[in-house]
Amino acid sequence: MKKKLVLTILFITTVLCFQAQYSHAKSRQSGELKGGIRIQKAQKLYWENGFSFDFKSPKIFDNRLHLGASYVTTRLGSALGTNAIKQDNFLVSGGYHFRPKMQFQPFARLNAGYFHADYEYAIFDVLPNSAVLLSLDAGLSYEFEIPLTLCLSAGYNLNSGSGSSGPGTLYPVFYQMSIFYTLLKKR
């Protein structure tokens, strides 16, 4: 049930981004959709890799508010070819960029989503393995002259787990790097 809710939210966010992008084609204002990879590391635990999308538009706080969706997993990170716990993170985000017209942009972001850990063995079914995610992160974004953007940030999961009240592999502190390629840009 929770996975369906998260996928529905991701779908609605994507549709809204494309709708805003389409409306800009008529108004001659710019809007951008970027896609790329996201590399994430929980402090003292797993590497998680995946993909991420970012959308900004002048109709949304003059390009200051960025809407995003991400999927990161240990299946493409620490669990690839090892016996590390397979876990998945589905996220939607809203970030505020403080210098939207500059190449170097500090930002703060709120993320929400769903976390699931696959412990694989029935003996671990008594342990919590999923949680609703809510996190904050802040960092720096740099837009290159070519259609690439690099984002680095550090964040904090507000509802990390202890193993008894939430998944034990959901650690509070994480670091992430995203490399985006501009997919759509309307002027």
Image (tube, rainbow, N blue to C red):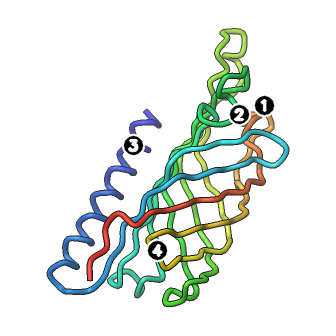
Name the element at disc 2: loop
Comparing labels 2 and 4, the label whose residue is closer to the camera: 4
Residue annotated with mark 3: 7
What amino acid type should be assigned to the residue bearing mark 1?
Ser
Q: Residue at x 77, y 34 (%)?
A: 168
What amino acid type should be assigned to the residue bearing mark 4?
Ile
Comparing labels 1 and 2, the label whose residue is closer to the camera: 2
Label pair 1/4, CB-CB below 8 angstroms:
no
Q: Residue at x 20, y 86 (%)?
A: 28
Query: In the rendering, which numbered label is found on residue 146?
Result: 4
Residue 124 percent across, percent down from the top left: 71, 16
Name the element at disc 4: loop
**Up-down: is 40 above or below 2?**
below
Residue 174 percent across, percent down from the top left: 74, 54
What amino acid type should be assigned to the residue bearing mark 2?
Ser
Name the element at disc 3: helix
Residue annotated with mark 1: 164
Query: In the rendering, which numbered label is found on residue 78?
Result: 2
Q: Which of 80/9 is in front? A: 80
